[in-house]
Image (tube, rainbow, N blue to C red):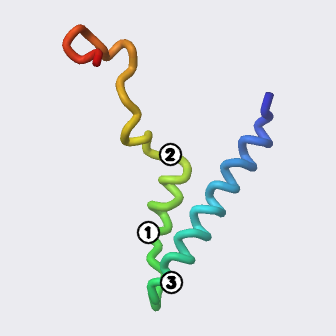
Amino acid sequence: MGTASDSTELRHQAIVTALTSELERQAGSGASRIDVHALAKAVESALDPAPPADEGRRPSELNATNDD
């Protein structure tokens, strides 16, 4: 079982990865200034990612008209 320290390290690594990726994207696009709003959005996405778009239906969502 993971410890709080493991959880903190995973969170830290997710933030580092998000910041690194966003800064590389901005540098690659030739940005002359850092877009801190884009950095914040990248961190938010890393810490609370959106669910997959094509997840499908859960059993509780199925009925006779949509179970195919």
Residue 52 horizontal side relative to residue 27, left or right: left
Q: Position of residue 33 (x, y in %)?
A: 46, 87
- Write down the residue under mark 2: 48
Residue 59 is marked as none
Residue 30 horizontal side relative to residue 24, left or right: left
Measured Cα–Cα span from mark 3 to mark 1? 14 Å
Q: Position of residue 55 (x, y in %)?
A: 40, 34
Residue toward you, 5 or 30: 30
Query: In terms of secondary structure, where does tag 1 sit?
Result: helix
Q: Earlier in the sequence, mark 2 or mark 1?
A: 1
Residue at the front extreme, as displayed: 68
The quadrant holding residue 14 is: bottom right
Q: Residue at x 50, y 83 (%)?
A: 28
Q: Earlier in the sequence, mark 2 or mark 3?
A: 3
Q: Earlier in the sequence, mark 3 or mark 1?
A: 3
Check the picture and name the quadrant holding the N terminus: top right
The quadrant holding residue 23 is: bottom right
Query: In terms of secondary structure, where does tag 3 sit?
Result: helix
Measured Cα–Cα span from mark 2 to mark 3? 25 Å
Q: Residue at x 48, y 53 (%)?
A: 45
Q: Residues within 10 Å of mark 2 (few under 14, many from 20)?
A: few
Residue at the top extreme, as displayed: 64
Residue type at mark 2 is Asp
Q: Residue at x 49, y 54 (%)?
A: 44
Q: Position of residue 9 (x, y in %)?
A: 75, 49
- Write down the residue under mark 3: 28
Residue toward you, 28 or 47: 28
Residue 45 horizontal side relative to residue 62, left or right: right
Residue type at mark 1 is Ala
- Write down the residue under mark 1: 38
Residue 4 horizontal side relative to residue 32, left or right: right
